Amino acid sequence: MAKNVKRYEIEADVFSLDFSSCKNLIVENVTFIPFSDWRERYKKCKENTHTNTGIIKVSFDSSITNKEDAFRIAKEKLDLFSKLLSYAHGHDVFCDNWVTYEVINNERKEISRSRYSIRIGNVRGGGHRVYLSKIDFLIDVLPLINDKEFVKDTSILWAIAWCNEADIFSLTNAMEIQFVMHWITLETLANRCSETNDVELLLNAEQFKVFRESLKTIIEQKIEINDQLIKKMLYKNIDCFRRRNIVDKVIFLLKQLKLDKYSDEISKLNKIRNAIIHTRSVNSNDLLDAYRKLTRINEKVIFSLLGVLDKDYIRPAIRDEKLLSR
């Protein structure tokens, strides 16, 4: 008599996922199952209403021996998929209503249900970054995303998380917030790129020691400063001279990705960032153009890092050389 083999399947509702033109519905051990009326359901997204458009099933073989491990692995994987798909859509895509099944000889038995508190924004944002084949996009980028060294060396997931957060704000009501969040995205990627390529520091330890002592001599002997607190502040700030400034780091990142044609924009965008942070007024038209240029540069950088900027499913305006293309 054949031995009963037990395995697990985890299913969850997926909300606000556009299944248009998806050639593949299986990603690793995950199957995407659109509802027959998913197109009608998805139309509600245009009314700022999140709606479940299908089911995602994660299947395990018998090597996963308990339901807790199956659920944990499935939850981690679908959280990652949600982050990537949210970036592709320009709005939150998420899972809820989790069901765990025990499968023995192809007979399924429900053994638990779970729900999680989720913070989501309305279905808004700047529109889809990936127009079609969003699951094909997921398939294409997963080899890099599953590479822990790549993720560490680029901070790509942290950057995508910042973009996803920015997407939930209304452009008309919180453009300054969105701008700063997208600037943080670019800073995150640029800082990691400089560190990974060992160009963070302008001077090595010995060179900087000489430089520091020379500046201290100038402060002590060449400049008449009687206030000891000011002297301490100057000494403390000497270390700033050792590191590249953020504008130079971003320009280095763009050069690495062959996007240096946009380098002249970075100093201007940084001035807008400084004006917002330090509560100086910014002309609304200037801010809008700067916001569009910044988000477009971020999109070009992220899709370049993921190796898909030239794919047909990427929004044409993102692939266009002009930053203000729409």
Image: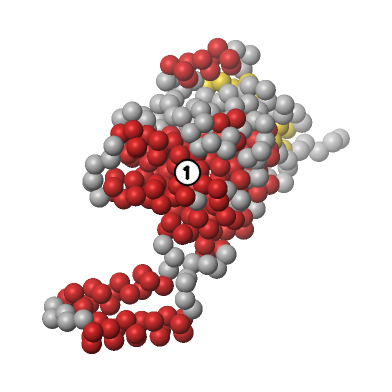
Tell me: 280 left or right of 72: left
- Secondary-structure class at tag 1: helix
Tell which of 200 and 155 is nearer to you. Answer: 200
Point out the image quarter for the N terminus: top right
Residue 174 position by quadrant: top left
Q: At 45% from the left edge and 82% from the top edge, which residue is drawn?
A: 207
Residue tagged 1: 161
Rendered image quadrant of residue 255: bottom right
Residue at image coords 63%, 40%:
309
Q: Is residue 286 visible?
A: yes
Q: Is residue 75 above or below residue 106?
A: below
Q: Is residue 137 above or below residue 66?
A: above
Give the residue furthest to the left.
Answer: 226
What colour-coding does the image apply? secondary structure
Within-10-Å neighbours for mark 1: few <14, some 14–19, many 20+: some
Q: In the rendering, at what x and y percent does residue 203 appear?
A: 47, 76
In this view, the residue farthest toward the right is 1
Q: Amino acid at mark 1?
A: Ala
Residue at left offset 34%, top offset 37%: 286
- Which one is in front, 244 or 171? 244
Compare residues 11 and 205 and report the one nearer the observer. 205
* Residue in the foreground of this view, choosing between 24 and 205: 205
Q: Is residue 11 visible?
A: no
Q: How many marks?
A: 1
Q: Is residue 222 left or right of residue 178?
A: left
Give the x, y percent position of residue 156.
54, 49
Relative horizontal placement of residue 284, taking residue 161 as reference (left or right): left
* Residue 301 locus on image (x, y percent): 55, 46
Q: Residue at x 47, y 50 (%)?
A: 264
Q: Quadrant of residue 219?
A: bottom left
Residue 70: percent from left, percent from top: 62, 42
